[in-house]
Amino acid sequence: MFDSLGLLPFLPFLGFLILFLSGGGLPRRIVAVVGAGSIGLAFLQALLLALPVIENDSLVSQQVIYSWMSVGEFESKFGLYLDGLSSVMILVITGVGFLIHLYSTGFMRDDPSYSRFFAIMNLFVSSMLVLVLADNLLLLYLGWEGVGLCSYLLIGFWYSNPSNGYAARKAFVTTRVGDTSMAIGLLLLFTQLGSLNIEELMNGAETQWGLGSGYAVAASLLLLGGAVGKSAQLPLQTWLPDAMAGPTPISALIHAATMVTAGVYLIARTHTLFELAPDVQLLVAFIGLATLLMAGFTAMTQRDIKRILAYSTISQIGYMFLGLGVGAWSASVFHLMTHAFFKALLFLAAGTVILSLHHEHDIFKMGGKRKQLPIAFASFMIGSLALAAFPFTSGYFSKDEILLAALAIEGPGLWLWIGGVVGAFFTGIYSFRLVFVVFFGESADHHDDKEVTGFTMAFPLMVLMVFALLGGFIHPPTDFVFSVEEAHSEHSVSTLIHAIMIAVPLAGIGVSYLFYGARLWSADRLLEYSLAKKLHGYWFSGWGFDALYRGLFIKPLLGLADLNRRDFIDSIVATIVAVSEAGNGLLVRFQSGSLRWYVLSVVGGVAILLTLGGLL
Amino acid sequence: MNEIPLEAGLLLATILFAIGLLGVMTRRNIVFVLMSLEIMLNSAGLAFVLAGARWGSADGQIMFLMILTLAASEVAVGLGLIIQMYKKFKTVDIDVLSALKG
């Protein structure tokens, strides 16, 4: 029974059903057991399922649960598919997911909507598992939309504040742009290849479409649109920083570890298609590069602890896209996994900081907190080291592989590598800016706050610390899935390159130390220059994308809606209203209230009728 | 015995009806309006009796009895309403009592 793939998404779904149907009537202890327990069981089952695949990565198991729909020639099955790639994903989703659920039982303990929180979290994990296990793109799309819905519900979890609702709508609508593109891509693939089964699609594309054929380019571009929306890449990245309005465990689970990497998974899953369209694949690399640089600049200027982490997530997913674009498929999935460890760690630690300091988000109001918040401090140190790719932490190995693969490709490879290394420099700066400002220096505020801790909150942090440090030694079993293995070979790379890649993040950390640790240099003094001030404002607002979109899309749309308020169809309705009002005004005069007038009209009417009768 | 010609009787009924109708239309005092209505009812009753006599049928007289009862009850209700109206509005002028206009 435990080798059934169908059970895996069903366990969290069962948890969702229990919590949802009980309508918040269950005691907290039971809610916590059901909510976290269902994910824990799912993790154990995922281990059982994935261990054989890790031992032998050519192992693939498939299971068709039932025929979902069958219309004419079209048939979609509720079929699940487990290979090396999905094994990594299910382990990350259920493993990190379980730790975050466990953390949430402590983090959310005072929230009145405790049960609703866990219900939606369970639904999310279930949808995410469907997404990564689906053997056809339609089922994948079901999971894709399911996680989008849960993301919406959880960003707006504290819905009584209208700005949270706005952030949720923004995330939903922005990702919807990408999802529409993806839906069109699915239709194109189906009409051209006659199937949505991923295996058949990839085989069909390889045999029927040549290298660089128009269909391959169009289909991969459309799928890329979906991936860009979900993974918050340029130009659809604006929703992710606002998505931080949700509770912090949500940011850790959905907006760092799992859902936002669904785009990376989609591209890795359909990599055959992208290999047929080399131009699009290169575009993926450049989108990743542009995004990681853009988000790196922005992260250096933010003040809100969660927004810094959000931009850093965007930037790290940019690295994954860069890896995908240069054909380093397994390196990207590797980075996806290590990123899930250290970013979940950072977000959960940020949750501890925020909760301990009574919902303080501004890092410049913290300062000197390393004695006050020892567990959060340790977590932030390790997480930031891994994020900045400090040698032999998990992030170092995965980022290294991506950058080496970028260097190996011909043409723009060197530029992609340089861009990636510059990004790594920024990563060093912004991650340690956060550490130095929050945990070192003078205590600015919140002197007496104690660290909120306890087993449920400390244990996940400790486990994640171990994985963030040592996760680089786990090798994802994806070599078989991406049988066209990366071309680069290790020994052709000179030691100089390696030295640069180790030195640059360290330099970033050093610069950060000079500014925020030792305070030899001051960022505030830099801002006295008008150019720096202008750039700072620009970066702080995320390169002005929000303002740009407001001017480019939102305002014209609102203008159109305003114009349409007095439209033609409405004027027809308005005429009917005007005519009946005029008729009413006319008839009201006859109702004079004068009895004699009524009699007169009756007599007149009778006279007319009689005359008519006489005439006929 | 000299019979009254039917035409003369019908003419009388018509004249009575016209008088009544004019009274309903022109009178302001609601008491007079009610009286004029009685005249109209009686003219109709007269026409029934005449027609019954003409055709040698009792139906006309039965009809007149019914109109008589109807008129009596109408006056009973109508006068009751008028008294209430006078108590409330201190007037019997129907031109003043026009609160039901649209």
Image (cartoon, rainbow, N blue to C red):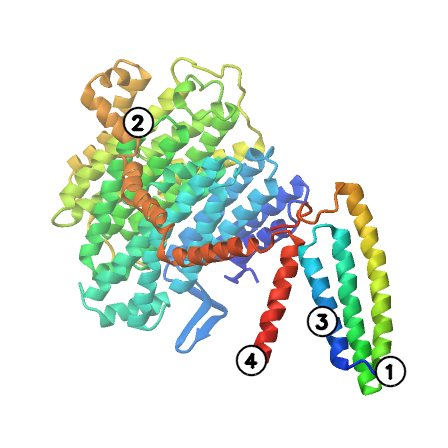
Q: Quadrant of the C terminus of chain A?
A: bottom right
Marks 1 and 3 close (CB-CB < 8 Å): no
Badge 3 local density, few (<14 within 10 Å), some, or many (20+)?
some
Marks 1 and 4 close (CB-CB < 8 Å): no
**Viewer-nearest of discs 1 and 2:** 1
For image coordinates 85% across by 61% down, the residue present is B73
Residue positioned most to the front: B2
Question: Which mark sits nearer the N-terminus, 1 or 3?
Answer: 3
The chain ID associated with circle 4 is A
Secondary structure type for disc 2: loop
Location of residue B57 (image quadrant): bottom right
Label number found at residue B58: 1
Q: Quadrant of the N terminus of chain A?
A: bottom right
Find disc 3 in the rendering and name its residue: B14
Which is nearer the eye, A237 or B32?
B32
Marks 1 and 2 close (CB-CB < 8 Å): no
Q: Position of residue A59 (x, y in %)?
A: 40, 62
Amino acid type of disc 4? Leu
For image coordinates 77% across by 57% down, the residue present is B34
Say whether mark 2 and mark 1 are on the same chain.
Answer: no
Which is nearer the eye, A219 or A12?
A219
Find disc 4 in the rendering and name its residue: A615
Spatial distance from mark 2 to mark 4, Cα to Cα?
Answer: 96 Å
Find disc 2 in the rendering and name its residue: A301
Spatial distance from mark 1 to mark 2, Cα to Cα?
Answer: 111 Å
The chain ID associated with circle 2 is A
Amino acid type of disc 2? Thr
Q: Position of residue A505 (x, y in %)?
A: 26, 30
Secondary structure type for disc 4: helix
* Residue A278 in view in this figure: yes
Question: Which mark sits nearer the N-terminus, 2 or 4?
Answer: 2
**Viewer-nearest of discs 3 and 4:** 3
